[in-house]
Image (tube, grey):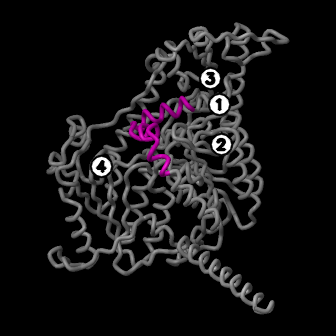
Amino acid sequence: MSRKKVLLVVLAVFGFFIFASVIFIIGIKAAFDSKPIIKDNSVLRLSLSGAITERFSPDAFGREFEGAAVQLHDIRKALHMASADKRIKGVYLRLSAPELGWAKAQEIKRLISKFKDTGKFVTAFLNYCDEKSYYMALAADEIYLMRNSFATINGFSVEIPFIKRAVNKLGVEVEVVSAGKYKSAGDMFTRKSMSAAHREATEALLSDVYEHFLQTVSQTRDIKREALAALLERGIYQAEALRGTGLIDGLKYGTEVSELIKAKVYGMEVAEVADKKLRMVSINNYAKLSPDDVGLGGKEKIALIYATGAIMSGQSGHDPINGRTLGAQSIIRMLLAARDNRGVKAVVLRVDSPGGSGQASDEIWAAIENVREKKPVVVSMSDVAASGGYWISMNCDGIVAEALTITGSIGVVSMLFDLSEAYEAVGIDWETLKTGPGADFPTDKRPLSPREWEQFKQLNRDFYQVFVQKVADGRGKSWDQVHAIAQGRIWTGARALKYGLVDTLGGLDTALGMAKEKAGIAADVSTRWQVYPQPKGFLESIMDKFSIRVAQSWLSENDTVSLLRQLSPATRGALRKLALFQLIRNGEVLAFAPAVPVVQ
C-alpha cells in the first residue's frame, strides 16, 4: 500500500473518531440540558417529604450528605412559571412529614396560595399528618388524609440537650463567657437545665408558633379558636379521629385522590374519567424549564446569593455531622462577583444561618459594605438568621423576614475546653516551655489563671460592644436601645419587626420588590435572577454526576451516616453544634445563636 493510501486511511480513522467523539459529547450534553416536554392538561406534582433545603449544595458529596430531595429554589421557580403556563391546570400537593423550619413552611404556603389565586386548583394529600404538614396544606382547595394513617396533631414542643455531666465524667471542664443574659449557646456545657432567661426566650418562641398556628387554622378552616385549642390539648393520633373536626375534607387513598384530580383537569365527574390519562410533572423536572419558556423572562438582573450554614473562616463545605458550613471566603467571592457584574442592578442575600465565628461574620459584613457602595443589598431571612446570621444582615439596605423566622440573638459567647483532668486520667503528661506566664494562652492543658480569666471576659465584652454598636449604626438606634433588645435573645420575625430589627415581613418575592425599588426598577418591570453559587458548566456537571454516584455508594455502606439520618432533627442539631465548637479555634469569640430551638 502506498504512503498516500496509508495517510488517507489514517486520516479517515482519525476523522471518524473525531466525528464519533463530537456526536457522543453532543448526545451527553443534550441529555444533561434536556428540558421536559409539557403537554396540555398537565398537573404539577409537589411532593414534600424528608429534608427541604434552600438550595442544593454545589458540592455533589455535600448534596448527598444533606439528603434533601427538593430545594425551595425549585419550588419557588416552578410555582411561578406554572402560574403563567396554560398547560399546567393545577398542583397536586403531597406531604409526608417534611423536615424544614417554620419560615420555609410559611413561604411555601404563601407560594401555593399565590399560584391558586390565578384560578388554578390545588389539591393536598397527606400520607401522615403533623402540624407543619397540615399548615402548608391549608393553602389547598381541599385537604385529604390517607385512610388508616397516623397523625400527631397535639401541640408544639422544644427539646434542649444539656451535657455538663457527660463532659465532666470525661474529665473535661468547659469555661464559658457569654455577653448577654439570654446568650445560652454555652449553657449545654455548664448547666443541667435551662436558665430563667433561656426558658423565657424559648417559651416566647413556642408561644408565637402556637398562636400563629391557631390563628391561621381557625381563619382558613372556619373553626373556633377555642375548639381548635381543645383538639390540640387532647391530641389526635389517628386519621379517623380527624373526621368530623372540620380540619380535613375527607379520608382517601392516593389512587382516589388521583381520580379526583383527573376530574378537575378534564372538567368531568369522577366516574367519567376512568379512561383519561393523568399527566404529572414533578417540581424538580419542571424547574428545568426557563422562565423564558413560559413568557416570564426579564432583562434586568438581580443577584440572588445563598448564605446557608454555620459561618466559618475559609471555604464553604459540608459533612454528615456539621451539616453545611458557610465559608467567609466563599460568600465574599460571590458578593464581589455580583458587585463587579455590570448587568446586576441589586443584590438579594438569602440568609439561613445560626451564625458561627464572630470574626468570619465581620469579614462578610465588611464585604457587604463594599458591595453597597455600588449597588443596594437586601436581605431575605429564611428559617434562621440569628447572631452571626444577623450580623451579616444588620447593615443592609433592607431586611425581610418571615413572621416565624428565628432572628436576633445579638450577643457573643467564648469557650475554652480544659482537658487537664482528661489527660491525667488517660496517662498523658505535658511539659510546656514558654517565654512568659501567658504565652501558651489559649490552651486546653491547664485551667485559666485569674488574670487570664479577666482578659478572656474582657475580650468577650469588647466584641459584644462592637456587635451592638454596629446594629445601632445599621438600624438607626442608640447603643442603649439595641442593648435592651440584644443580650443574646432570639426573636421571631414578627417580634423583630416590632423592635425595628427587620423592615418588613414576607418572603423572597417581598425582598425582590424591595431590591427593585432601591435599584430604581419599576415594580411592573420583569427581572431575572442571577444566582450564586452559579450553575456548573457541562464538564463539571458530568463529574458531579459521577461524584454523586460515588457518594451514594459510600453513604449506603456507611453505618454512621445511616444512624445520623435516623436521629430526630433536634438531636442532629445538637450534634452539629458540638462538632462546630470543635472546628472553631479554642477561645474564639462566637456570634452563634443559643441552641436554636426546633419547634415540633
Q: In the rendered view of the protein, which quadrant contains the N terminus?
A: bottom right
Q: Which residue is mark 3?
A: 179
Q: Is residue 515 above or below residue 490?
A: below
Identity, as a three-letter code, of the amino acid under mark 2: Ile
Q: Which residue is mark 2?
A: 392
Residue type for callout 3:
Ala
Could one spot residue 55 in this view of the protein?
Answer: no
Task: Tell me the quarter of the image containing the C terminus.
Answer: top left
57 and 320: which is toward the camera: 320
Q: Amino acid at mark 4?
A: Val
Distance between mark 1 and mark 2 Cα atoms? 18 Å
Report the residue marked by disc 1. 584
Q: Are marks 2 and 3 in contact (CB under 8 Å)?
A: no
Sequence-earlier tag: 4 or 1: 4
Tell me the element at label 1.
loop
Is there a contact, CB below 8 Å, between mark 3 and mark 4? no
Residue 113, percent across and down? 38, 61
Identify the residue under disc 4: 217
| Image disc number at residue 26 | none
Q: Secondary structure at mark 3?
A: strand
Which amino acid, mark 1? Ile
Q: Position of residue 432 (x, y in %)?
A: 76, 11
In magenta segment, residue 567: yes
Q: Residues in magenta?
A: 552-579
Q: Quadrant of residue 241?
A: top left
Q: Main secondary structure of the magenta part?
A: helix
Residue 354 in which image quadrant: top right
Query: Alpha-carbon distance for marks 4 and 2?
Result: 34 Å
Q: Earlier in the sequence, mark 2 or mark 3?
A: 3
Choose between 567 and 590: the one closer to the eye: 567
Q: Residue at x 45, y 69 (%)?
A: 286
384 or 374: nearer the eye?
384
